[in-house]
Amino acid sequence: MLRFIRNSFNTLLDDHIQISEFFEYSKVDTIGYPSNVTAVAFDEVLNLFCVATCEGKISIFGQEKSLSCFLTESKDYVPRKIVFATGSGFAVIEASSRKEIKFFRLFVNASSVAVEEMQKDPRWKVTNAYSIAKNVDNKFVFLQGTQGGNISKTFLETLTCEEYTRCDEFGQFLRNAPIVQMAASPNLDKILITQKVEANIELDEESHHVLTMIDIKTQKIITESVLDISINIENVTWTIEDVICIQERSGNIIDLCVQNLRRNTETNTSNGFFSCFPNKGLRQVQYCYCKNKSDVMEKTLVFIGGVTETIFGDRNIVTLRSDSKTCSLELGSPVQSIEIAHESDADDKFASVLIILAKNELVFIDLRSECYRPYPTRFLYPLDAHDITCTQSLTAEMQLLTQLNEISKLSWCDDSKYSTRSHTFFSNILSNTTDTDIKYDNNQLVLTGFSDGSITITKPGIRNGTVLFQISTKYEYMEGFDFSSSVSNEECVSGCQFYKVGVYDTYSDEPGLEIASLEIDSHTGILAVGTKMGVVLIYRMNNEELTLVPESLHIMLCGKEIATHSKIKKIPTNLNTPRRTEFHYKAGYQPYSSENGKSFFAQLVPNTPIYSLSLLCHRNLVVAAAEFGFAVINYKANMIIFQRSFITLDDLSDVVMPNDTWSVFKSMKKSIRDTFRRRRRPRDEDQSVSVGEGRKQQTFEYPKEDAQSDMRPMERCVESRTVRREVYKPWLIRYSKFIKLPWTNGMTDVLFVGTNGGKLFCCSVAEEGHEVTMIQDKEIVLAHGAPIIDVDHFIDYSTKNGAVSRLLVVTQEQVRLFLIPSLKSTNYKIKLTCKEGLKNRKSRIVQLTHKNGTKLNFLMLLINNGEIRLYSLSNPGRNIRLPLSLENNHLAMEHAIMTSSGDFVYIRSGQSELQRVRIQAVKDNVSLFGV
C-alpha cells in the first residue's frame, strides 16, 4: 500500500520565484585601522594619510574617504618606507623581499588608488639612496643614486626613465664613487648627495665622505664639503627649517649649515646636548621648531630611543629634547618610525603633530601642548592591540544612539590625558560626520572584548569606525594597579619627564582580566561583562562624575563537596577580591551603583569562565552562566533570585586530570594509527608458498575481493553520544537568553538555558507582590545531545491556522522547531551530520527582500567549513550555500557578527579590520555600515 505524506509546511513562495533571487553575495568594504603596519606617510597639502601593512596592503585615509589596494598579487614585498610628492597625489613606496628591493609608484585620485612598479635599467646597480624632487618644469621626478656615482631620473606622472646622466653634466666633475645618501630640501629644488670615496695610494688620498649640494633646476653645484671616514653615516635629514642633520651609527648627531655644509658650532649635539642619555641606539633623528608656553620658537630634537637601559630597562621610547625640557614617551609596543606633521593652513612652519608608528598602534602627539599630550585616536583605533576574546553586535534605538554620541564626546573631551586642541589633520581626514553619513540611519554598534580586560564600543561608519567608549575593568580590582593618570593636569616643569602613551598596560598578562562574554541592552544601554575568573560587572551611562566602592556578592553555584573534588585546572590570579578603596569615575560608562553609593561586583564560585550573559533590564535581572550552573541576579537589589547547577560528583569523576593529558594523547594517536593501518600484500598475486622440501608444492592465493578490501582503510567505530567521553562536559552551559513569549499565563519573559549536552531549560519570570521570582517550567532533552548554540522565536504565517509562534533551537548538528507554548516538536528538521565533521558555529534569523518586493525570513547558518547556508523557515528544502573561504580562519568564525538585515561581518585573517559581506539582493538604507 502506498501512502502519500503531505508536507505540513506551505511555502509562501510561488513556484516561479527562485530562492537565489533573494541573495547577492558581495564583499562590500572594510572598517578599522589595519594591523602589522610597517610604514606611514602624510601629505600635508592634500590631507592624505597612508598606511602600509606587512602583507603589502596600502590604505589611504583622507578627503572624507578610505581607499585600499595591494602592491602585488603575490604579497611577497613588505613596504618599508613611503615618501609623498607633496600636493601631487603621487608617492614612492620602498618595498623589500628576501632577495631585492623594489620601488612602486602610488597614485591617489578622487575615487581610486593605483600602484605600479617602477622599472629600472638593468645595466646599472642602483643603491638605496633616493629622493623626490622637482624638475625644471615643476614636475615631480624620482632620483636614485648608483654605484658609479650616477643619478637616475624617473618622471612620476609617466614613469618614463631618462638616460642615466653623469654627475659631471651638472657643471663640475664628481668622484666616481657610490652614492650612499640623498636628501632633498623642503622646497624640493635642491638635493644633497653623499658619496663614499675609498683611499687611493697613487693620488695620496685617504678614505672620506664627500657632501655635494646641487641645484636641480640649474644643474649646478652650490657647495661641497668633505667629512672624515671615521664618521659612519646612518641617515641624512634635511628638515623643513633648513637644517641638515647627519646621524652616525654610533648615535652621535652632527648639524651642518646649509650655506657651507660645515658643522654648526651653535648647537653641539654630541657634547653636552644629551648629557643624561647615552648616544647608542638613537634612530630616526629629526629637528623641528615648536612653540613653548610663552609662544616663543624653540628648537626641538625628536628621536627614537635615548633612555638609560640600566634604570628603566629595554623600553620603547620616543624622546623630545629642547632647551627648556626633555620628555620621554613610553609606548607599550616597539616603535618602528616617527614623522612630524605641520599645519596645512597655517602661515608659520611650526610643528604641530608627532606621528609615532608602533607595532600594534598609531599614536598622535600634540607638540603644541606643554606636556605633549596625545590626541584621542577614536577613528584609527587598532582592534588587535591586545588579543580579541569576544565580540557582540547591537541594533541600538535612536534615542540610545543619540545619548551615546553626546556622552561619548563629553567623556573624550574631559579626559585630562588627551589633548583638547583642534587640528586640521583630524578635521579633514578622520571626520566621521559628513553629509553622506547623516542621511543614513546608522544604528549599529560593535562591542569588542580584549585579553587585558578592556572593552571597546565602536560605531561603524561608511568609511571608518568611531570609538565611542573605552572601558577598562581593571579598576574594579584591588591588587597591583596604579589608578593615577598618565599625564598630570598641571603644566610640565623643566627637567626630564616620563609619560606612558598609547595602549600601555603592564598588567596585560594577568589571565583573570580576560573578557569572556558581553551583553548590552538596546533600550537602556546597560552593559553586562563576564570575565575569565567568573566575575560579573554591570556598567551604565552617566554624564556626571561619581566616586564608588565595589560591593562584593559571592555566588556558590554548586555544593562545597563538588567544588572541593573538582579536577578542573585552576588559574592563579589575584583578582578574586574587589577594590576596597574609592575610585573617581569620569563621565561615560560607569559601574552600576545602588542607592548606597556602591557598585555591583558578583563573584561566581568556583572561579570558572562565564560563557553566557543575558539581561532583562526592565526587571533589573542579569543571568550569568558558567560551567557549574547559572544564577539569576537582581543587580539593583544585589541579591540572587534563582540559581541551579547541573553537575554532580559522578560527572566530576570523568573529568580528565591535567596530568593525564599526555597519556590520553598517546592512546588517541595509537588508535588512529591502528585504524588506518593496511596489511601487507605479496609482491605478486600468483606468488606461491612452498610447504617442505621434496613434497609437492601447494599454492595459496589471496582472493581478489580480499585483496581489494585490504587496500582500503578499516572503518572507524563511531560511538554514540550516550557513551560519555572523558573530555565531554554535558553540564556546561553554552547559551542563555530572555525572550518575551505567549506563555501559559500570557505574555511572559522566559529564560532559555542551553547546555553542552543538548538540554534546554525554560524558566518563566513571575511577580509575587513587589518581588520578582523565577520558576522552571519545562525541559527539552534533544535525542542527538549536541551542544545548543542559539534559541530564537519567530511567527510562522505559512500554516492553515494563520500565524503560529514557533521556537527555533539550533545545535551544532541540527535545527529543530517547537510549538509555543506546548513546546511540541514539529516535522521541521535540518541535519548536518550527513557529512562527517560539519558543525554549526553561528546562526541568525534574517529578513531578506526579493527583487519584486516580497519579504521572507531565512535562517542564516555559519558552518565550520567556512560557508554560509540559508534555509527558508517555511520549507527547509529551499536553501542556498554561499562560500566564504573561512575554513582556516577560526578567529573569524568564532567572533563573526550576523545582522538582521543580511550582513555578515568577520575579522580578517591576521588583521584588526572588519570585513563586511552582503548577501541581500535588494540594498536597504539601514545596515551595519550605513550604506
Image (cartoon, helix red, strand yellow):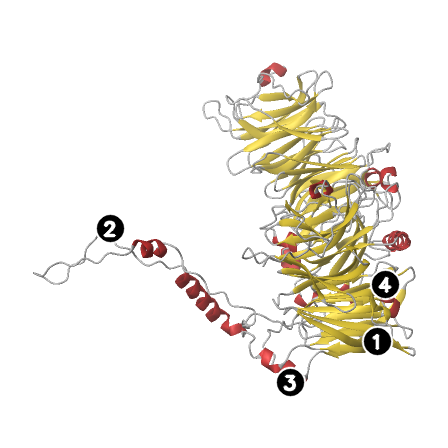
Q: What residue did someone put label 4 on? A: 540
Which mark is first along the chain, 1 or 3? 3
Which mark is first along the chain, 4 or 2? 4
The spot of residue 484 in percent (x, y) is 80, 63
Q: What residue did someone put label 2 on? A: 684
* SS assignment at label 2: loop
**In the picture shown, does residue 464 fall above or below 262?**
below
Query: Dot 2: few (<14), some (14–19), or many (≥20) neighbours within 10 Å?
Result: few
Kindly report the distance in space between the C-alpha atoms of the residues bearing marks 1 and 2.
81 Å
Amino acid type of the residue tagged 1 in the rendering: Asn
* SS assignment at label 1: loop
Q: What residue did someone put label 1 on? A: 638
Amino acid type of the residue tagged 3 in the rendering: Glu
Callout in the foreground (3, 4): 3
Amino acid type of the residue tagged 2 in the rendering: Asp
Query: Dot 1: few (<14), some (14–19), or many (≥20) neighbours within 10 Å?
Result: some
Callout in the foreground (2, 4): 2
| Visible residue check, residue 453 | no
The spot of residue 863 in percent (x, y) is 62, 53
Which mark is first along the chain, 4 or 3? 4
Instruction: From the viewer's perspective, tell me whether residue 145 is left or right of residue 32.
Output: left
Amino acid type of the residue tagged 4 in the rendering: Arg
**In the picture shown, does residue 4 fall above or below 64?**
below
Q: What residue did someone put label 3 on? A: 561
Which mark is first along the chain, 4 or 1? 4
